[in-house]
């Protein structure tokens, strides 16, 4: 089995920062792309940022210059450093990873971590 465990969410004031972490564990041969998505109440889940195993990154326009995605391949972990947060960033943030197992590749999702930006 494979698990993605997220941490780092919470309540922060506008203009503040948070760092999300996500680590994959279990019967894993390799981890390809990893990323973060978010879903605000009443809205569809949307892509925030992705990173390939080689470190190539892709960001949604609404986070460019504010968020930074990174990963540690040795730990099968991905991180999201968020800064200059606004109330519009309030959402449940989900980690995703394209994981290769003996049975083949599959995208896995974390359970989600709540980020609330409010004064």
Image (tube, rainbow, N blue to C red):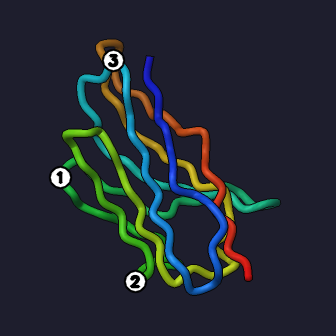
Q: Quadrant of residue 13?
A: bottom right
Residue with the most extreme right position: 42
Contact between marks 2 and 3 (CB within 8 A): the answer is no
Rendering coords of residue 19 (x, y %): 45, 63
Circle 3 packing at 10 Å, graded few (<14), some (14-19), many (20+), is: few
Give the class, few, some or many, for how many residues have Cα within 10 Å of label 2's Cα (few <14, many ≥20): few
Secondary structure beneath dot 1 equals: loop
Name the residue at 37% across, 28% down. Answer: 25
Who is closer to the viewer here, 25 or 61? 25
User: Residue 74 versus residue 100: which sits nearer the camera?
Assistant: 74
Q: State the separation of the CA atoms marked 2 and 3.
A: 35 Å
Which dot marks residue 65? 2
Vertical position of residue 96 compared to residue 87: above or below = above
- 8 on left or right of 53: right
Q: Residue at x 33, y 17 (%)?
A: 27
Which residue lies under the disc numbered 1?
A: 54
Q: CA distance from mark 3 to mark 1?
A: 21 Å
Nearer the observer: mark 3 or 1; the answer is 3
Q: Earlier in the sequence, mark 2 or mark 3?
A: 3
Q: Residue at x 47, y 44 (%)?
A: 96
Residue on which disc 3 sits: 27
Mark closer to the chain start, 3 or 1: 3
For the residues labelled 2 and 1, the Cα–Cα distance comes to 21 Å
Residue 90, horizontal then vertical, whole percent:
68, 68
Relative vertical location of residue 8 with respect to residue 101 in this rendering, above or below: below
């Amino acid at each position: 089995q494979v698990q993605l465990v997220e941490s780092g969410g919470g309540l922060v004031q506008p203009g503040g920062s948070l760092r999300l972490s996500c680590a994959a564990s279990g019967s894993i041969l390799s981890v390809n792309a990893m990323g973060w998505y978010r879903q605000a109440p009443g809205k569809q889940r949307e892509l925030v940022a992705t990173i390939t195993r080689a470190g190539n990154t892709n960001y949604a326009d609404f986070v460019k210059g504010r968020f930074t995605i990174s990963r540690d391949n040795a730990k099968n972990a991905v991180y999201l450093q968020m800064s200059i947060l606004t109330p519009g960033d309030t959402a449940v943030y989900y980690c995703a990873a394209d994981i290769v197992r003996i049975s083949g590749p599959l995208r896995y999702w974390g359970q989600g971590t709540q980020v609330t930006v409010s004064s």
